Amino acid sequence: MNRTLNSRRAPDPKTSEPRDRARRWLLLAQGGYYLLTGLWPLVHLSSFAQIVALRINPFQAQSYGAVLIVIGACLIEAARRGPPDAFATLLGAAVAAAIAVVDLVWLPRLGVTSGLWFDLLVEVAFAVALILFYPRVQARQKRSSSRRQRL
């Protein structure tokens, strides 16, 4: 089957499952948060440095911002195309968990008292919510149906 990038249409909110809608909104929110967070050091590095309240390396801050923009755009596109699949949900949860772990390890060591603690809470919330809405049943059904087809 030939597929193009725009081959999937946006889902009808009335016919989507509640868990699919929740996962979709979570990924849209997370993608938007990452886009804004990623753009910040690229657009206005000095205000980013003031909020972070640490001496920052411009290269690292802007590289991190660029990576967040790419991840955010991918999450938004996955949510826009329809009910997010297991991969998009796993990507969102894994990225949020990874950022949360780094925040949890380094914020106390650095003695940070700024808005970075807020970021830790946001990342934990995204990771937990996406894990709760992970499409486990669908993934098992697909595996079992593919096994049956091989037999």
Image: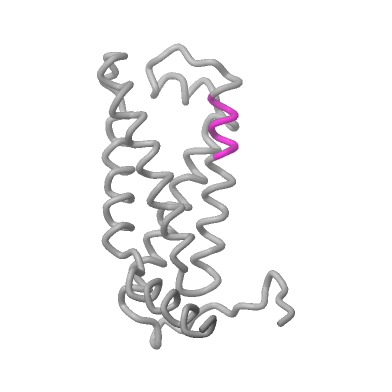
- Magenta region: 61-67
Residue 118 against residue 46 in the figure, above or below: below
Magenta segment: does it hold 129?
no
Residue at 56% in and 62% down = 77
Q: Where is residue 90 in the image (x, y as percent from the top left)?
A: 42, 56
The front one of 3 and 122 is 3
Residue at 53% in and 68% down = 80
Which quadrant holds residue 83?
bottom left
Which quadrant holds residue 116?
top left
Residue at 27% in and 14% down = 111
Residue at 27% in and 48% down = 125
Which quadrant holds residue 9?
bottom right
Q: Is residue 28 left or right of residue 64?
A: left
**Quick one: which residue is furthest to the top in this view?**
55
**Quick one: which residue is furthest to the front in this view?**
151
Residue 17 against residue 130 in the figure, above or below: below
The front one of 15 and 127 is 127
Q: Position of residue 27 (x, y in %)?
A: 42, 59
| Quarter the N terminus occupies | bottom right
Q: Where is residue 55 in the image (x, y as percent from the top left)?
A: 45, 11
Q: Where is residue 141 in the image (x, y as percent from the top left)?
A: 39, 79
Q: Which colour scheme is used?
A: one colour
The front one of 122 and 147 is 147
Magenta stretch, main secondary structure class: helix
